[in-house]
Every structure is written in C-alpha cells, then in structure tokens.
C-alpha cells in the first residue's frame, strides 16, 4: 500500500464529463445525470483500500444527510482489476448495495486521469455550474489513528455551498492508497 496524497486540482476547474457503468444497476451514468443544482460530490474510491474502509460508514452517513439536502454523490472506482481483482465490478456490487448513491467503474481509467485523481479516497466537490469548490480529504481521521471519523472537512465545504458562502480555500489533500494504474 503506497500512501499517496491527492493532487489538489486548481479550484474553479470545470468537472470533466464521464459516462460510466453503475455496477449495481448495469446502466450508463453521466455527469449530467448526476449533476445537482446545488453541488455534486465525486469520490474516487475502491473496495480494498484500508483508508476507504476506514471512512466508509462515515461517508455513507454524510452522503445520506446531504443527499436529503439536494446534493448529489457519485463514487468511481478506477483501479486496475487485473492486479487488484477485489476491485472488480462484481465485488463492487457488494459495496454498492450499502451506498445511497451510484458506484461507477472506470475500466479505462480515463475518468481518473481527467480528474487528476491520485488516491482512494479522493474527494471533489463541484458547485451548480460544475466548477470545483473543494478537493481534498474527508476529515483528519486515518486507519489506526485515535481521531474519529466525522467527515468534518467535506461537511464544512458542503455547508458553505448550501449557505451560499464561499468554501474556504484552506483545504487539506486527501491521503490514501494510490490509484492502481495499469502498466
């Protein structure tokens, strides 16, 4: 497991479009399908990463809270499943059943590259115009730390968007497993 920070794309970067398969429903999903008139959260994650497993219950809770407020969530797995078969679409279905939002498979890894995603989990928040207002960590908690999982950083950004306030530019990179790129 290579611990990797997120890339931290420039704020105001326009969200790249995508068209990926929702592993649970077997249907193509586009960015336009998931776009919210408030905010859209895109998280790059996978099944096997201990950093994702550590925050997953908290992510589900935070997502449920903000989905009810009109914010859209989507998860994308871009890992190479040849090397990491636990991240295959078949195994993704088990995780997807517990999420309240689509879990998409980026087989070609082109979406992860377009977003400059580097790790799992890697969070991006786009405003109603699909401009990046937040990129970075869920919170300060890490596996084997005594810091509780709260989703504080992501929640603070979403609360600002909902209140019509600018999101603080003081944003910390996410830390997680590197995306497993094809060689």
Image: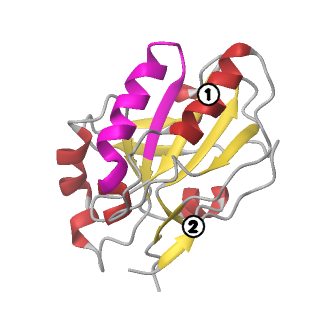
Q: Position of residue 35 (x, y in %)?
A: 59, 26
Against 163, is 8 above or below?
below
Q: Which residues are magenta?
A: 54-75
Q: How many marks?
A: 2
Against 118, is 133 above or below?
above
Secondary structure mainly formed by the magenta segment: helix
Q: Label 1 to label 2, Cα distance in Å?
A: 22 Å
Q: Residue at x 42, y 60 (%)?
A: 142
Q: Position of residue 2 (x, y in %)?
A: 45, 81
Assign a secondary structure to mark 1: helix
Q: Is residue 74 magenta?
A: yes
Assign a secondary structure to mark 2: loop
Q: Residue at x 25, y 52 (%)?
A: 92
Give the camera-side residue of 134 and 75. 134
**Along the horizontal axis of the image, is 49 left or right of 66?**
left
- Contact (CB < 8 A) between labels 1 and 2? no
Q: Position of residue 16 (x, y in %)?
A: 68, 46
**Within 10 Å of the Cα at label 2, are there few (<14), some (14-19), or many (20+) other Cα atoms?**
many
**Along the horizontal axis of the image, is 144 left or right of 39?**
left
Which residue in the rendered view is the most extreme toward the bottom? 183
Tell me the quarter of the image containing the N terminus: bottom left
Instruction: Quickly name the residue at label 2.
Output: 118
Q: Report the disc number at residue 158.
A: 1
Tag 2 or tag 1, which sits nearer the N-term? 2
Q: Residue at x 41, y 61 (%)?
A: 107
Q: Is residue 96 magenta?
A: no
Asked which quadrant contains residue 71, the reply is: top right
């Amino acid at each position: 497991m290579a611990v990797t920070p997120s890339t931290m794309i420039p704020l105001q970067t326009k969200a790249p479009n995508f068209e990926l398969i929702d592993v649970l429903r077997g249907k193509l999903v586009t960015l336009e399908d998931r776009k919210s008139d408030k905010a859209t959260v895109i998280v790059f994650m996978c099944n096997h990463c201990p950093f994702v497993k550590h925050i997953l219950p908290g992510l589900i809770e935070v997502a449920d809270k903000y989905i009810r407020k009109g914010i859209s969530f989507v998860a994308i797995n871009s890992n190479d499943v040849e090397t990491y078969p636990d991240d295959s679409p078949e195994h993704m279905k088990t995780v997807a059943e517990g999420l309240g939002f689509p879990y998409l498979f980026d087989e070609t890894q082109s979406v992860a590259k377009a977003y400059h995603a580097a790790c799992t989990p890697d969070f991006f928040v786009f405003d109603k115009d699909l401009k990046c207002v937040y990129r970075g960590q869920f919170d300060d908690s890490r596996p084997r730390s005594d810091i509780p999982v709260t989703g504080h950083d992501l929640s603070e950004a979403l609360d600002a968007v909902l209140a019509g306030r600018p999101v603080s530019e003081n944003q910390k990179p996410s830390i997680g497993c590197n995306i497993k790129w094809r060689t």
